[in-house]
Image: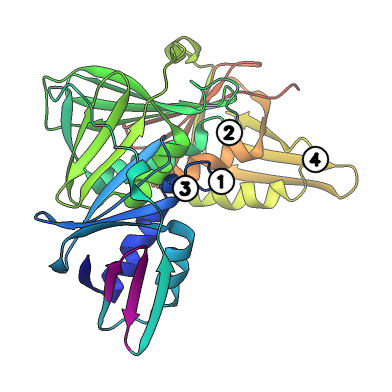
Amino acid sequence: MNISIEKKLFSEAVHIVARFAEKKNSTLPALSSILIIAGDEGIKMRATNLETGIDLKLKGEVKNEGVVAIPATLLQQIASSLSYGGDITLEHIGDIISIKSGTGKSSIKTVAYDDFPSIPFPENPKNRIIISGVLLRTLFTSIASCASSSTIRPELSSIYLSIEGGILTAVATDSFRLAEKKVPLINKGIQGKFLIPAKNALDIAQALPDEDIIMSFDEHQCAFVSTFGMLVSRLTNAVYPDYRQIIPKESIVEAVVLRKDFETAIKQTTIFSDSFQKVNLSFDPKKNIIALFARNTEVGESVETLSAQVSGSPLDISFNHRYLSAILSLTGAESLSFLAAGIGRPLIIKGVGDTSLLYLVSPMNQ
């Protein structure tokens, strides 16, 4: 194999693809490698850790066709050391690949590529939708943070995706808080639901292009295809809980507050939160205020009072401040709406004017 690629393009591609290689020491060295293929379809880079996989297309010149597997960590280090400008040349002879950049040259011992596993593709091409890469990236990166970091219950460490009536609904919960985000689709007739591991979704989000992509799925895997190539993730084989049952149907108090005021108040109050990260939220309909209170016996206490539109009954309820502040990364709305169903009941937070998002937080013991 003998190929030439623009250095900037090569470096960016290596860092994207390396994300999908196995990070741990593997009994199968091919899993910790990046496979470079030069042939009739041009130049491709592949990597997989058996959970996720990528097949990335690159622009470049193919002088001689061939296939080579190179340790991903080593290739990343080389890519990071490159100065942009000019091309990089890769020439494979025997079990050595020579990488030439400017006046420099590196010789690397390659990995046997015969053991490199194939990257599976969903078997049913009818289950597919078209969606903007930018939109899907934003959806994954925001929702994934609300999934559980523990793998004890794999369904909770996954993102639930449901396609129905031309709407893609994404849900993530760790049983303490829940985020639901809805996105309209071009395809109106497709229906389906599946679970994608949150960590896989985050890796895929980092590699998605801005352009429209085709997302297809079956019972075992989900693929994301565009002119850049293909990304694949294994799906979670589990049943997602009926999360709609925990969403309160009624509220005893509702309040609307400016986002910037709430953001400032939560930052100030959390300085004084205790080891349980507890912050008390008080709704006062008579004075039209929301008060945030935190006390730490070793530090002191703080009260932040916000002007708000409050209707209903007065209520004091406590939450983990991390879960309250998470709404700020989920919506860009200028005002936030709070709907509380009472003591011991979840709090619903929405962005005013943002009908796509519902965020729910469970209270702490008073």
Tag 3, which secondary structure? helix
Residue that badge 3 annotates: 29
Residue at x 70%, y 46% (from the top left corner): 270
Residue that badge 4 annotates: 274
Given the image, on which type of amino acid does mark 2 rest? Answer: Ser
Marks 1 & 2, CB-CB < 8 Å contact: no
Residue that badge 2 annotates: 149
Given the image, on which type of amino acid does mark 3 rest? Answer: Pro
> Is residue 67 a member of the stretch shown in magenta?
no
> Is residue 92 a member of the stretch shown in magenta?
yes
Residue 265 appears at what percent x and percent y? 62, 49
Q: Quadrant of residue 292?
A: top right
Gap between marks 4 and 1 measured at Cα: 37 Å
Residue that badge 1 annotates: 24
Within-10-Å neighbours for mark 3: few <14, some 14–19, many 20+: some
Indicate which label's residue lies in the foreground, 2 or 4: 2
Indicate which label's residue lies in the foreground, 4 or 1: 1
Marks 3 & 2, CB-CB < 8 Å contact: no
Q: Nearer the viewer, residue 226 or 294?
A: 226
Which segment is the magenta one? 89-102
152 up-or-down from 242: above or below:
below
**Label whose residue precedes the other's in the sequence (4 or 3):** 3
Marks 2 & 4, CB-CB < 8 Å contact: no
Tag 1, which secondary structure? loop
